[in-house]
Image (cartoon, rainbow, N blue to C red):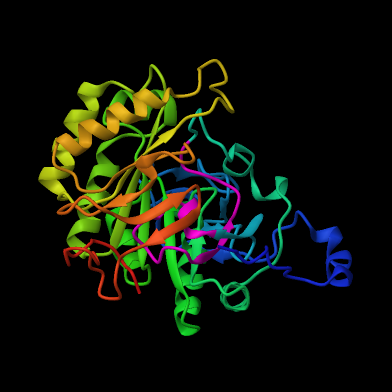
Amino acid sequence: MVYAAPVVIASAARREEEKSEHKGIFVVKEVAYYKKLKNKQVECETCPKKCKVGDQERGYCGNKENRNGKYVTLVYGNPCAMHVDPIEKKPFFHFLPGTSAFSISTAGCNFNCKFCQNWDISQSRPEQTPNTKLLPADVAYYAKRSNSESIAYTYGEPVVFYEYMYDCAVEGHKSGVRSVMISNGYIEEKPMRKLCKVLDAVKIDFKAYTDKFYKDTCDGTLKPVLDVLVLLKEIGVWFEMVYLVVPTLNDNMSDIKKMTAWIMKNLGPDVPLHFTRFHPTYLLKNLPVTPVKTLEAARRTALDGGMHYVYVGNVVGHEGENTYCPKCSKVVIGRIGYTLSENSIDKNGKCKFCRTPIAGVWK
């Protein structure tokens, strides 16, 4: 399948004209969720870190600033990355397969994962990244122009550009373009509930089923992410989970078995779970690539635990890339990397062979 090339968002002349502002902060907008404290301090209420920020200081994510007691985001309309990607790259395997997503990100993150592939975005401030002024209506326009079925908030952490993401999703819906969030799930309940009203799907990068891994490797905690997963199930928005298997750190099959049991009890068997292959990067260059047999063992553990849709990721051509009907076991979606080799799900979301409904968003 041929995917659209990355869209050009400005003419060469216009880019030259704005070169002096290339790393600038174009728009300053008040943060949606925070409270004011004494002495011009503020407390952010977007994510569980709940940063208390003094006047003229910034929170953990580095892209919000307290200006005289008013907390503002510095990345609204200020993306540093824009591409047109296959939806399978996110990865979403049960959401509009074979379509493209107009993908954007801004600088900043509320985690510092030692294995982050996009650390140059996530661990930067907006003054340090090459940015382009692109307001929500512009994002919707270019998504439509590039024949993308969705806008994907990805690469960095969308929670830290919450206000921009929300408004882009609203504008996208006006143009018939859906929105998907690729996130660590580290967000407070109130903003997440509101966000789900304008999102069409969420992918949670689930780091591990131990608090130790979250604290030591990501600078976060486990429980808020579990709470968000339960919330997504309650609300009914489509979501998938990705588990990057890092050798020696979160590849314990006993923990994966416990995680599977938790998913079955709290989320049900139809949540797609992707076990993906780790490659040495950022602060974890001392560890090896994940052995394929480890990914296969994790997949088998989850399938044996009752889950219906479990995948092996970052291993092109592996049978674990395919979607199998949970009843007749035939391949209903075949994949080679980000490309579909076959699709045997009918327009009603059922297996063409045995008519069993396949969980997902298919049209």
Looking at this rendering, what residue extends furthest in the left direction?
A: 265
Give the residue drawn at x 25%, y 50%: 229
**173 or 280, nearer to the observer:** 280
Does the magenta-highlighted stretch encompass residue 99?
A: yes
Q: Position of residue 338 (x, y in %)?
A: 50, 52
In the image, residue 358 above or below residue 264: below
Q: Position of residue 112 (x, y in %)?
A: 50, 34
Asked which quadrant contains residue 295, the reply is top left
- The quadrant of the image that shows the N terminus is bottom right
Q: Classify residue 159 as left or right of residue 137.
A: left
Report the predominant secondary structure element of the magenta stretch: loop
Q: Position of residue 33 (x, y in %)?
A: 40, 60
- The quadrant of the image that shows the C terminus is bottom left
Give the residue drawn at x 53%, y 59%: 86
**9 or 125, nearer to the observer:** 9
Count of numbered tags? 0
Give the residue drawn at x 60%, y 58%: 75
**27 or 327, nearer to the observer:** 327
Q: Classify residue 355 as left or right of residue 77.
A: left
**Residue 108 is at least partly visible in this image:** yes
Does the magenta-highlighted stretch encompass residue 130?
A: no
**Residue 42 is at least partly visible in this image:** no
Q: Position of residue 212 (x, y in %)?
A: 31, 23
Give the residue drawn at x 46%, y 42%: 110
Q: Which region of the structure is painted magenta?
A: 86-111
